[in-house]
């Protein structure tokens, strides 16, 4: 249960500390005193949506802390341990909102993720607010309530698994069928492209080789002239450079006895001669290979035109063209397998549809079997909430096609006046009736059976008198199994509380702040008198408040 709640810098709350006990805890106060802010803070603590708008003006961050007693709740203690946090019988939660956007979460003093806080929060607290009333106006939520009442989690899991798989297979088959529609045209195109690339007989790097060959063929005359002239100048002519240098080198070498330095220079020159001779011979060989071949030049240019045409079609490089050709062959193989794949998918789809029908029929049978039990349970709860003649039911209507929540839709029907046929709840229930129906449903089919704490935010909206007393009695009955926190404006509800907190708004040093304190017996009588009589409190009002409290302490029906 929630034993302690600390709120700092949230909306108009400066600092507020509340210590709750087991049983039925009630918070009352004038309209606008800040009671709903406390609920917003609890929602924040449980991982609800946080906004910088919640931070008190002039403050950089808002903080909400909560302490939960997990004594005797091994499942919750195990969840905390499995999540990697310090185990124990007490659980400490902390949520910090920052104007800079750096929001932080702590579980038992360790930094945590928001998702971890939300997962724990779902098990710790069931929060029933005005949105729960509105949820009753949405017929798609009615089936959920029936399933929760009947405990059909396994049936839902089996059906959802088959339904999701059926949807996957249907989408896959539709994609294949779309491909099959254009299969012939696509196959013809791919075969042409693959054949065009394959017939070209492309070699990687071939284009660079051909470009070089074309350059040589286009410049054959110049290349021949240059190589021949070089050979003649270096070696072949009468006054060839090699011969002249050879004579110079010989003369220098014969003077070695006169000056060794000249002999060394002669040797150096002769070494250079060897390189010149080698160059001359390479020029001679090059000239011998120069080809004047117009036919070959045209062949090379035609080949380059083909390769460049393929580049424009299939890729900027020869490697890219070859990769495209390989992709064509792969897709041709895939298209060839389409028919076999479609047949396999159709068979799997039929099997999945059979499983879906079986799971859906099983789920539907369980729902139909739970209809009467839920009707009786809710009507019992409504009778205890001052609606003794109310007739409740849920009607199941088969769907033409399986839906995400089964083979049928469901809707609550209600009659609150004797002799009137039940009509759709969404069209006839008043605000007060919705409040009591919501409480009756959640007593008959609790939102989460493991929740330690149940919080009701103005569940008494739109009702009063005997109906309010019935709601209060029912909430106290529920509180004998789960801790209950309730915000109420009705003294008939507050009279049943085990602990009564008064919330008030005060002006302090030009700032508005919210205070809350637990009431003793006299304070409780005074607050109840205010709720009964408004600003004008008389001795009679006080006496009525005492009687209301006294009458609420009668025998209770255990949960």
Image (cartoon, grey):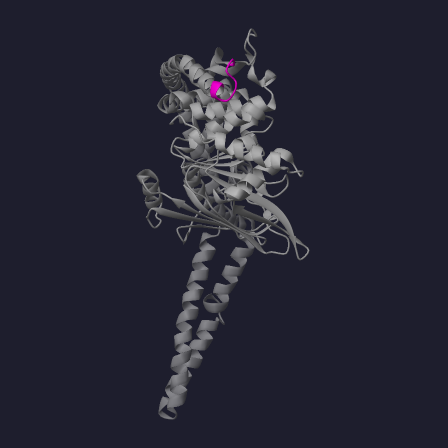
Figure check: 215 above or below 267: above
The one nearer the camera, 319 or 407, is 407
Q: Which residue occupies 40% across, 15% down?
A: 373
Query: Is 388 within the magenta?
Result: yes
Figure check: 413 above or below 457: above
In screen coordinates, is 488 left or right of 149?
right
**Residue 47: image x %, image y %?**
48, 42
Q: What residue range appears in magenta? A: 383-390
Q: Is residue 117 visible?
A: yes
**Residue 179: image x %, image y %?**
48, 22
- Quarter of the N terminus within the rendering: top left
Rendered image quadrant of residue 195: top left
Figure check: 109 above or below 455: below
**Residue 248: image x %, image y %?**
44, 81
**Residue 12: image x %, image y %?**
62, 49
Q: Which residue occupies 39% across, 92% down?
A: 259
The one nearer the camera, 372 or 4, is 4
């Amino acid at each position: 249960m929630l034993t302690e709640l600390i709120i700092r810098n949230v909306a108009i709350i400066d600092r507020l500390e509340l210590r709750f006990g087991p049983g039925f805890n009630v918070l009352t106060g004038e309209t606008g005193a800040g009671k709903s802010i406390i609920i917003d803070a609890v929602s924040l603590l449980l991982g609800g949506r946080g906004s910088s708008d919640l931070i008190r003006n002039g403050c950089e961050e808002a903080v909400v802390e909560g302490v939960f007693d997990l004594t005797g709740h091994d499942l919750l203690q195990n969840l905390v341990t499995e999540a990697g946090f310090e185990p124990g019988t007490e659980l400490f939660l902390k949520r910090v909102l920052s104007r800079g956007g750096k929001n932080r979460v702590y579980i038992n003093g360790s930094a945590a993720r928001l998702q971890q806080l939300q997962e724990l929060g779902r098990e710790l607290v069931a929060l029933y607010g005005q949105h729960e009333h509105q949820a009753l106006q949405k017929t798609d939520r009615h089936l959920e309530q029936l399933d929760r009442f009947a405990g059909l989690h396994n049936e839902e899991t089996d059906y959802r698994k088959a339904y999701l798989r059926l949807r996957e297979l249907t989408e896959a088959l539709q994609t294949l069928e779309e491909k099959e529609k254009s299969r012939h045209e696509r196959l013809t195109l791919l075969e042409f492209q693959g054949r065009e690339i394959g017939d070209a007989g492309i070699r990687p790097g071939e284009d660079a080789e051909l470009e070089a060959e074309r350059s040589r063929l286009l410049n054959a005359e110049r290349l021949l002239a240059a190589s021949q002239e070089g050979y003649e100048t270096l070696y072949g002519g009468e006054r060839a450079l090699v011969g002249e240098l050879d004579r110079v080198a010989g003369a220098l070498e014969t003077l070695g006895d006169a000056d060794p330095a000249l002999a060394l220079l002669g040797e150096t020159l002769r070494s250079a001669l060897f390189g010149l001779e080698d160059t001359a011979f390479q020029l001679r060989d090059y000239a011998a290979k120069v080809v004047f071949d117009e036919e070959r030049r045209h062949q090379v240019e035609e080949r380059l035109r083909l390769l460049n045409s393929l580049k424009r079609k299939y890729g900027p490089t020869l490697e890219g063209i070859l990769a495209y050709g390989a992709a064509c062959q792969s897709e041709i193989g895939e298209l060839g397998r389409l028919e076999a794949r479609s047949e396999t998918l159709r068979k799997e789809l039929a099997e999945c549809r059979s499983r879906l029908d079986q799971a859906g029929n099983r789920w539907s049978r369980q729902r139909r079997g739970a209809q009467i039990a839920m009707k009786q349970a809710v009507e019992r709860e409504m009778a205890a909430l001052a609606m003794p003649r109310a007739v409740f039911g849920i009607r199941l209507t088969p769907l033409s096609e399986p839906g995400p929540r089964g083979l049928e839709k469901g809707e609550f029907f209600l009659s609150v006046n004797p002799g009137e046929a039940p009509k759709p709840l969404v069209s006839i229930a008043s605000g007060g009736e919705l409040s009591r129906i919501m409480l009756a449903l959640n007593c008959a089919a609790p939102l989460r059976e493991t929740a330690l704490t149940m919080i009701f935010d103005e569940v008494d909206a739109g009702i009063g008198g005997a109906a309010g007393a019935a709601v209060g009695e029912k909430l106290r009955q529920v509180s004998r199994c789960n801790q209950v926190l309730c915000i109420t404006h009705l003294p008939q509800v507050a009279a049943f509380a085990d602990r009564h907190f008064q919330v008030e708004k005060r002006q302090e040093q030009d700032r508005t702040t919210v205070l809350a304190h637990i009431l003793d017996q006299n304070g409780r009588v005074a607050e109840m008198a205010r709720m009964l009589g408004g600003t004008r409190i008389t001795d009679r009002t006080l006496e009525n408040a005492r009687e209301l409290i006294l009458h609420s302490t009668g025998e209770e029906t255990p949960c």
